Image (cartoon, rainbow, N blue to C red):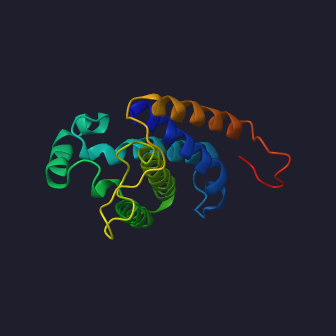
Amino acid sequence: MNKSAHLIGGLTAGIAVSKYIVPNVPYNGEVNEVVGIGAVLCGAILGSLLPDIDHRNSYIGRKLRITSFIVSKTLGHRSIVHTPLVIFAFSSLLFFLAMQLTGIIHDISLFFVIGTSYGMYSHLFLDMMTRRGIPLLYPLTSKSFRIANFKGGGIGDNIAIISCSILIVLMLLDFTVPFLTGLKF
């Protein structure tokens, strides 16, 4: 997937997290709702690009050249950085660091970390729709898994962008499916 697809995927994940998960997260209450949602969305957008740090020509790879060079040379593209286990470990580390903070910085950091985590998972989900897939079960196996067979930069990106745009509109309109009682999008 390309940068645009990952960005809108991250935004979709951020809106979903802000709407359905963040209201249930206990925090100190020192930030208002708008700041918390902003932190989640910023984190989700950053997280949606972060796994491509292992590709030197990606958007984030060009912004963080030295880090990207090191990760790319040592790990390669779509290897360990594109696995749920590594994202879980990285998110856990960020969460641990956020929990060491106090006051308003704690709350903003917590929301940012939650957004970053879900943004990274949205990246993996979208990359699973490409021909190359991702090593989903690493370290058990390095075999790549995919749920679709789209070429990167092709129609799959357009489908992802349109689908995510529709989901965003439905979430913002608080759309409820009448025949599925209690389920909201």
Report x, y in % for residue 134: 36, 53
- Which residue reaches farthest front? 149
Q: How many marks?
A: 0
Left or right? Give the position of 134 relative to 62: right
* Residue 134 in view, yes or no: yes
Left or right? Give the position of 99 relative to 61: right
Specify the quadrant of the image occupied by residue 151.
top left
| Residue shown at the point (34%, 58%) measured from the top left | 135
In front: 65, or 142?
Answer: 142
Report x, y in % for residue 96: 40, 67
* Residue 32 in view, yes or no: no
In front: 146, or 77?
Answer: 146
Give above or below for 89 relative to 63.
below
Left or right? Give the position of 126 relative to 35: left
Left or right? Give the position of 8 relative to 21: left
In front: 3, or 42?
Answer: 3
In front: 99, or 95?
Answer: 95
Quarter holding the N terminus is top left
Report x, y in % for residue 101: 42, 63
| Residue shown at the point (79%, 44%) measured from the top left | 176
Give above or below for 27 relative to 108.
below
Give above or below for 118 relative to 58.
below
Report x, y in % for residue 146: 43, 51
